[in-house]
C-alpha cells in the first residue's frame, strides 16, 4: 500500500500529509489523482475481495465486506425465556453458553414440641459451552429455557429445575431439589442438599455438572437450626437458607442457581422452601 510520500515530494518526512508552513518555507502536501486512486483501489479491492459486486447506490459495502471477515463477532443474543433463534445474516458459526434451571430448596413440615425440621438447598443446573456451525442450525432453532424449580411445599423435597436446550443440539440439565427431614429434637441431624444437574450433552468446548446444594442443619433446641444454601451456578447468585424463624431465606438469583432451604424449631408451623433460578442461553454469532 502506498503512502502519499510515494506520489509527491510535498509530503512530510514520514511520507504523510502536512498542512505546511508557508512562513517557514514548508509547502502543504499536494492532493493528487494518483494518491486518491490508491485509496479507491484499496477500498474496491476490500469489497470485491469479499465477493461483493460494487453498487454505486450502496454506501455500506465496505462495512458488509468487513462483516464477512472470518471470525468477526457479529452479534450477541441472550435468551432468558423460551423462544426461537434465527441467525443473523452472514453468521458462519456460533458459540453457545447454556445453564439449566436451579433446583428448589426443600420445605419443612410443622413440628411438635419434641421434634424439629430442616431442609437442604437446591442444586445448580449444569453448564456447557459449544461451537456449532450454522449449517446445523438452519434458518431457525427452538430455544427452551429451563425453569427454576419451585421450593418444596411443607415437608416436601424441592422441585428440580428444567433443562435448557438449543433444538436437539445441546442440553444443559437442571439441578435437583433439596430434601426435607423432620426428626427428634433430642439430637443433631441434617437434610441433604439437592444434587447437581446431570452431565450436559453437546458441549464440545466445555461441559460441567452443577453443584450440590448445602445441607440443612439442626443443632439443638438452644443453639438453633438453619436451612441449606442453594448451590451457585457459573452465573453466581445462590439462594440463602433460612434460620429458625423460617423467613430469612431467599430464592436463587444467578441464572441456574439453587433456592435456599428452611428450618423449624419445635412447636412451629410448616414453611416452604425457596425457588431455584431459571436457566439462560447465550449465543455469540461469528462470521
Image (cartoon, grey):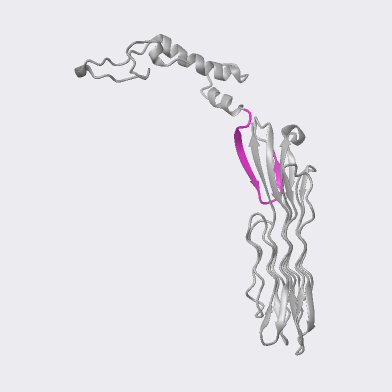
Name above or below for residue 228 compared with residue 277: below
**Where is residue 21 shown, x and y percent of the image?**
24, 19
Q: Quadrant of residue 228?
A: bottom right
Is 260 located above or below residue 222 in the figure? Answer: above
User: Looking at the image, can residue 211 be seen?
Assistant: yes
Identified at 75% across, 42% down, the residue is 204
Residue 25 horizontal side relative to residue 148, left or right: left
Q: Count every numbered label the image shows and give the total.
A: 0
Q: Which quadrant of the rendered structure holds the C terminus? A: top right
Q: Is residue 218 magenta?
A: no
Q: Is residue 56 visible?
A: no
Comparing 99 with 148, the one in front is: 99
Q: Is residue 197 above or below residue 120?
A: above
Q: Which quadrant of the view contains residue 86?
A: top right
The answer to whether 256 is drawn above or below residue 21 in the figure is below
Image coordinates of residue 194 in percent, x first then y, are: 76, 65
- For residue 80: magenta? yes
- Which of the 4 quarters of the picture holds residue 263? bottom right
Q: Residue furthest bottom?
A: 113
Give how far across and how far down residue 211 sits, in percent. Answer: 72, 60
Q: In this picture, which residue range is highlighted in magenta? A: 70-86
* Camera-side residue of 142 and 172: 172
Residue 272's spot in the image, x, y percent? 72, 73
Residue closest to the far front? 13
Compared across the picture, whether 59 is left or right of 285 comes to left
Amino acid at each position: 500500500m502506498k503512502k502519499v510520500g510515494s506520489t509527491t515530494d510535498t509530503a512530510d518526512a514520514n511520507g504523510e500529509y502536512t498542512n505546511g508552513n508557508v512562513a517557514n518555507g514548508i509547502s502543504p502536501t499536494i492532493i493528487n489523482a494518483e494518491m486518491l486512486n490508491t485509496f479507491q483501489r484499496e477500498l474496491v479491492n476490500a469489497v470485491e475481495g469479499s465477493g461483493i459486486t460494487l453498487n454505486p447506490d450502496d454506501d455500506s459495502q465496505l462495512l458488509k465486506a468487513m462483516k464477512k471477515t472470518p471470525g468477526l463477532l457479529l452479534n450477541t443474543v441472550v435468551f432468558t425465556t423460551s423462544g426461537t433463534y434465527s441467525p443473523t445474516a452472514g453468521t458462519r458459526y456460533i458459540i453457545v453458553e447454556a445453564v439449566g434451571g436451579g433446583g428448589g430448596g426443600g420445605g419443612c413440615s410443622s413440628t411438635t414440641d419434641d421434634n424439629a425440621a430442616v431442609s437442604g438447598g437446591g442444586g445448580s443446573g449444569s453448564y456447557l459451552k459449544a461451537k456449532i456451525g450454522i449449517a446445523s442450525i438452519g434458518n431457525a432453532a427452538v430455544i427452551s429455557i429451563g425453569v427454576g424449580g419451585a421450593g418444596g411445599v411443607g415437608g416436601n423435597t424441592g422441585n428440580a429445575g428444567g433443562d435448557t436446550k438449543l433444538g436437539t443440539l445441546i442440553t444443559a440439565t437442571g439441578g435437583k431439589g433439596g430434601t426435607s427431614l423432620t426428626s427428634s429434637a433430642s439430637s443433631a441431624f441434617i437434610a441433604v442438599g439437592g444434587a447437581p444437574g446431570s452431565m450436559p450433552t453437546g458441549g464440545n468446548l466445555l461441559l460441567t455438572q452443577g453443584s450440590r446444594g448445602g445441607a440443612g442443619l439442626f443443632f439443638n433446641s438452644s443453639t438453633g437450626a438453619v436451612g441449606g444454601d442453594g448451590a451457585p451456578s457459573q452465573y453466581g447468585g445462590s439462594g440463602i437458607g433460612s434460620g429458625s424463624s423460617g423467613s430469612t431465606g431467599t430464592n436463587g438469583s444467578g441464572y441456574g442457581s439453587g433456592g435456599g432451604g428452611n428450618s423449624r424449631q419445635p412447636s412451629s408451623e410448616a414453611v416452604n422452601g425457596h425457588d431455584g433460578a431459571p436457566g439462560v442461553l447465550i449465543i455469540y454469532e461469528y462470521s
